[in-house]
Amino acid sequence: MTEPGVIPAWVAEMDYAVADVITDALLEAVIRGRTGYPPYAFGGELGRAYADWAERHFDQTVDPELVIPTVDVTAGMRLALDVLSEDAPVVMPVPAYSPQLEIAEITGRKRVDLVVDPDDERAVIDLEAPDAAFADGARTLILTQPHNPWGRVFTHAELEGIRDVVVRHGARVISDEIHAPLVLPGADHVSYLAVDGTADHAVALVAASKAFNIAGLKCARVVAGDVATRDRLFGAPMARNDSWSTLGVVAALAAYDEGDPWLAAPVERLDRQRTLLEALLAEHLPLARMRPLEATYLAWLDLRAYGFRDPAQVCLERGRVRLAPGHDYHPGSTGHVRLNIATSAERLTEIVHRMARALAT
Ligand SMILES: Cc1ncc(COP(=O)(O)O)c(C=O)c1O
């Protein structure tokens, strides 16, 4: 959406150019006519490339044969719910990535919200809440690790706590790990599947799309914990999961195999941007509250102290800057906004200046 004079700071894409290794691989693929169907198979080159990446970046051993391509992470989540989950309510920590708020309903299940306290300094999942939800009949937990929009990276110990609750109730986990390549200095990504005792009840959804700005090319992956889960997923009728794109595969391979040097630059830049944002907020929006941003380029700002139910609307109308409104991520999250910091220092500065002018009473 282009709105003249409005700075877009809402959508989850970076202002940074696509890596040359990806552009080159795509150009070559098109020139060679690689525009037909991709292989319809698990494992293969994509499985190998992801397993290598997980080893290098997360110190995680992934069996390449347990990696199944899918169109995108949200489609993979739907697939996992449809194929693996019991016909029972789905627990979702909220605020959450907004298009996924409806995913339980789309698959015919009820969503049970696990609302994080906006005043919790760390955004910790209160384990009593999923415990109670599972005791009431819920059977699946949707985990987002690292979390959007909380900006949190859950620790190994936190994931173990979640696992214990899930195992106690014989439930399942679908772990959306799309933001894992963008864990910023100071934190380490731990896949839920890397925690002992999770293989038989969990899948992880992974993609190079957020970190490498290739979401439109449509190729993500479901990582199954074990062969039985993989076979259930891949044994589903083809029409449930067959639409990932050949160019998406090409881009993902280039990202995983050759993208490390490129990725180091945005990670370093985002590290500086989050520090800049803290300084800008302290100076120009001192009533704003933000938890430390541990991953991603999406900052979750608590602007309730400025007294507006919908500060995103105020910033758009008075400040000509488009932010994502908090209530899109959970109806109760009024007074919050999500701000994309993956831009230049100058533009981030201008965004905060505009917000400050808009919210000044
Ligand atoms: C947590 C999370 N999951 C999924 C997505 C979307 O991924 P996809 O386009 O692969 O469905 C996003 C996009 O920002 C996201 O933040």
Image (tube, rainbow, N blue to C red):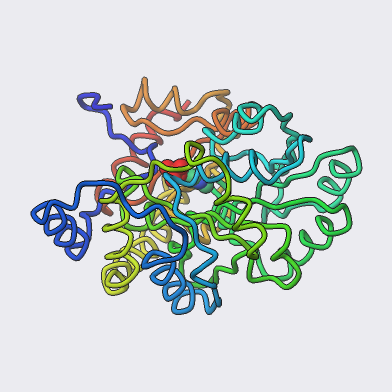
The x and y percentages for residue 59 are 53, 79
Q: Residue furthest top?
A: 317
Q: Is residue 50 left or right of residue 87?
A: left
Query: Which residue is pictured at 37% across the width and 25% down the height?
Result: 316
- Across the whole image, how many numbered discs are drawn on residues? 0
Q: Nearer the viewer, residue 185 or 352?
A: 185
State the image quarter where residue 44 is shown: bottom left
Q: Nearer the viewer, residue 189 or 124?
A: 189
The x and y percentages for residue 174 are 64, 51
Q: On screen, 38 above or below 47?
A: above
Query: Which residue is pictured at 69% across the width and 65% down the height?
Result: 199
Query: Which residue is pictured at 30% across the width and 46% down the height?
Result: 217
Residue 278 visible within the image: no
Query: Which residue is pictured at 90% across the width and 38% down the height?
Result: 136
Q: On screen, 259 above or below 224?
A: below
Q: Residue furthest right?
A: 135
Residue 303 visible within the image: yes
Q: Nearer the viewer, residue 176 or 288?
A: 176
Q: Which quadrant of the figure contains the N terminus?
A: top left
The x and y percentages for residue 133 are 84, 41
State the image quarter where residue 340 is shown: top left
The x and y percentages for residue 62 are 54, 72
Q: On screen, 102 above or below 194?
A: above
